[in-house]
Amino acid sequence: MKLRLIGYWEGPHAEGWPTAQNFVDPAQDRGDVRVICGYLEDGAVARKYRGLSKCRFCGEFVGSLERTDGVYIWPDGLAHYVREHSVRLPDEFLAHARRMGETLECAEIETEWWRRQEGLGPDAA
Ligand SMILES: [Zn+2]
C-alpha cells in the first residue's frame, strides 16, 4: 500500500519540501477552510513519530502524529496551517477530500453481516 504524502514544509532541518509561505491564499472561503480542517483532523492516526513539529509561520508546536484517509497521509499540524495561516492545499487534494466526504455521506449501509453475528453465545461468559 502506498500513501501519498502531503503537508511537509521546508524548514531549518527539512530541505527539499515545498515552502509553506508560497501556499498562502487569504481569499479562501471560510466555509471551505472549516470543511477541509475537519477533514484533516478526522483522519485516522497512522503513525506517531518522535519529536514535535514546529509551525513554519509562528513556531508553535503542532503535533507529532501523522493522519491518513487511506489515500493521503499528512502531519497532524496541517490543519493549523490551513486555519491559522491561510495555507491553501492543492486543488487535487481539496477535490479528493470533497469527493471522499460525499462518498461516505451517500454510501449504502449493509446491515446483514452484523445481524448474523452471534458472538460466543450466552454460555461463554
Ligand atoms: Zn502557526
Image (tube, grey):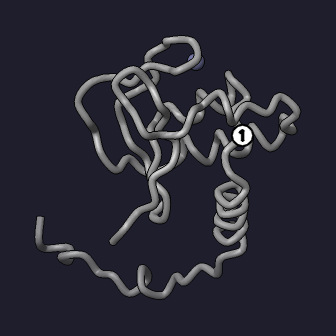
Which residue does the image show at 47% across and 31% down from the upper left? 10
Instruction: List x then y, in percent, for residue 83.
Output: 69, 28
Res 54 quadrant in image:
top left
Q: Which amino acid lies under the numbered mark 1 shown in the image of this protein?
A: Arg
Asked if ligand 1 lies within 8 A of label 1, the reply is no
Q: Can you name the residue that lies furthest to the top here?
A: 59
Quarter location, residue 52: top left
Q: Image height check: is 63 above or below 110? A: above
Q: Is residue 119 left or right of residue 125?
A: right
Judge left or right: residue 8 versus residue 98: left
Give above or below for 84 relative to 30: above
Quadrant field for ligand 1: top right
Query: Where is residue 9 drawn, in percent x and y?
Result: 49, 34
Say which of 58 and 14 sits in front: 14
Task: Please state, as top left, top right, bottom left or bottom right, where the C terminus lies in the image.
Answer: bottom left
Q: Residues within 10 Å of mark 1 (few under 14, many from 20)?
A: many
Give the percent coordinates (x, y) of residue 4: 46, 60
Q: Which residue position holds label 1?
A: 88
Q: Is residue 95 left or right of residue 14?
A: right
Residue depicted at x 67% and y 72%: 103
- Quadrant of image for the N terminus: bottom left
Q: Residue at image x 47%, y 46%?
A: 74
